[in-house]
Structure formats: C-alpha cells, structure tokens
Amino acid sequence: MVKTFTLIIACAALLGAGACTTKTAAAPAEDGITGATAVADTATVYFIKDITPENLVKIYEALGRPAEGRVAVKLSTGEPGNNYHLAPSLIAPLVQKLNGTIVECNTAYNGGRDHTADHLKAAADHGFTAVAPVVILDAEGEDTLAVAGGKHLKENYVGKGWKDYDFTVVLSHFKGHPMAGFGGAMKNISIGLASSRGKCWIHSAGQYTDKAQVWTNVPADSIFQESMAEASKSVIDAAADKILYINVANNLSVDCDCVSKPARPEMGDLGIFASLDPVAVDRACLDAVFTSDDHGKIHLMERINSKSGPWNLEYAEKIGAGTRTYKLVTLE
C-alpha cells in the first residue's frame, strides 16, 4: 500500500502522525529558512520507516530509475573506531542486486583513511569488502568538473576513477557533522566524491588544495556551506540522469562517520528516504528531525543550526542544484 503526502518543505511532520492529509507549510521555524520554490518544481521523496535490507531494495525500486551498467555505490566506509556507519549487512542485498562497486575517496585529514592502503584496510575491517569490491576513486589522481554559476568555486576535483562508472547510487548515512552540521546526500556528492585535494579545495572555498594549509584557514560556516553546494552542483550536472539518492537516517549522532570516537546518538532512528533530487531528500530528513517528537532531537538540531546546515540546501536551490519543495510518499 502506498500513502501519498503532498507538502511544501515541512510536511515531514506527518511522519510521526497517524492522519493522512495534504497540506502546505513553510519551513520549520527552528532553521530560519522561509519561502519555497513554485509547486511545479516539487520533487518526490519516498519514505519507509523500518530500516531493513528488504526495504532498502524496495525504496530503490520505487524511484523508477534503474541503475544500469557499471554501478558505483558511494557511501562512507567510516573512520576506524566509528561503528555508526551503514552496516554492511543492511546494504548488501541492494549493492549485490546492482552488481555494484563500493566507492570512496581518501580523506583530507590525518587519520585512518587518508592513504589508499589504510582506507582499504578500514573498509575491510568494517566489513564492506565482504559485500562488494571497494575502490578508492582518487587512488590514481583526480578529474576536474566545471562548476556552473559558482561564486566560490569554478572547478571541483573528484576522484579520477568516478568516470569509469555508468551510474552512481548515492547511499548516505544521514547524521550530524562537526563542520557541516549534518551529512546526507549533498555532502556525500561534494566532500564525499572529492579527491583528497578536492576536499581541501571545498573546505577552503577554493583557496587551497594542501591539507597543511586548509585547516588553519577555514572560512565561515555559511561560506563552507555554499562551497559544498557548488561542488554538489558540478556532480549533479555531470551525472545528469545517471544518479539517485538514498538516505538512511539511523544512528543519529551529532558527529559523522569520519569521527573516530563519535558522540552516541540521542534520538531514535527515523527511517529511509530516497529521491532523484538530493536537495529534496536532505530537506525531508531535516524536516523529520525538526518535527520529531523525540526530545533527543535537540542535540542534533543544535549541531545542524550552529553550523548553518540548512543554508546548504537553500543556497543549492538558488543555484539550481535541486529543490527544497517535495511531495512525500510513504511506502508500507
């Protein structure tokens, strides 16, 4: 059975409600964003509450965009010591159904994944190599993508291996992040697909590609959010219709999978969200957090808002990367 909820921006409140209605509303007041694009620009976001391997396959199929050819599955393998990343047992049926390759890029900070050999070891230790082949896309360098209309970036540097794939499934663990406020689809295609040097480029809003320089010259949060959105747009433009986005909102720590000792989650799991629009799917996840009746949300909300997280999506909408206006379709 499929229940369809039509909404603009904040209808994710219905996730916790028993009624099935249609409504229009502004964005939740907590994030300070108001306004929306025209209803004609509405994206569809699918939602399923129970996080299971079977439901991950179901929500992929609901999108109606088959991942064909050589399929890259972009996810976070997780820093050594962090066990909140997506579980290999959860993703295995979907990845294997697609005959997919799990792809990542090296990090731009000193840790357990900043060099290819260490990164592959981390992926193996976390169980991902038992699911599918794992490829570090920037192991042999990077490619340049043009950024159309960016005010900070004119180019974006992605892992060179990305061009070898015909289709990308962006499989994101939605959670908090110490610098971005939250991580979802938009972060996964910007910072996530960027080479190690490209990550420095985005973090510095187009000033540095050397990690020895970037961390002492980090721009304001709002500038970083804009830089990520511009990098995301370059990937969206390059991929065209050969990409889709699935967010799994579980293990909702205020920290991301890149933190070796993350804070424990203080709110319950929300479910799986999927869309052909990365801005819409991230907005739906934010709305689900903001409107949840779980008191533990206050910690994640504080992290998101303190880093200007929602501005990433508003700015992305302004530059044509997607829409924050969506129709939520709940699958059962």
Image (cartoon, grey):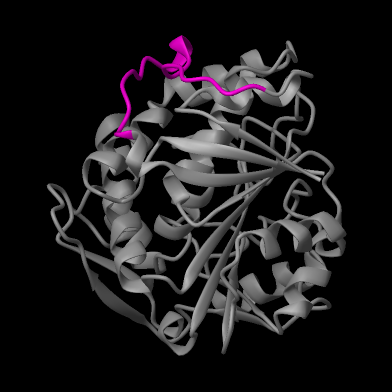
Task: Specify whether residue 218 is in view.
Answer: no
Is residue 287 toward the left or the right of residue 2 in the image?
left
Q: Residue at x 49, y 57 (%)?
A: 276
Residue 75 image position (x, y, % from top left): 61, 62
Residue 106 image position (x, y, % from top left): 50, 68
Task: Specify whether residue 319 is in view.
Answer: yes
Residue 61 image position (x, y, % from top left): 69, 65
Q: Residue at x 69, y 32 (%)?
A: 253
Residue 179 image position (x, y, % from top left): 45, 36
Q: In the image, which residues are magenta?
A: 21-38
> Number of marks in the image?
0
Q: Residue at x 61, y 42 (%)?
A: 256
The quadrant in which residue 74 appears is bottom right
Question: Is residue 290 positioned above or below 125 on the image?
Answer: above
Q: Quadrant of the N terminus?
A: top right
Q: Could you tell me what secondary structure mostly forms the magenta stretch? A: loop
The quadrant in which residue 22 appears is top right
Q: Quadrant of the C terminus?
A: top right
Membership of 32 in magenta stretch: yes
- Between 195 and 39, the residue placed more toward the observer is 39
Q: Residue at x 40, y 85 (%)?
A: 163
Question: Is residue 65 positioned above or below 258 on the image?
Answer: below
Membership of 151 in magenta stretch: no
- Between 24 and 193, the residue placed more toward the observer is 24
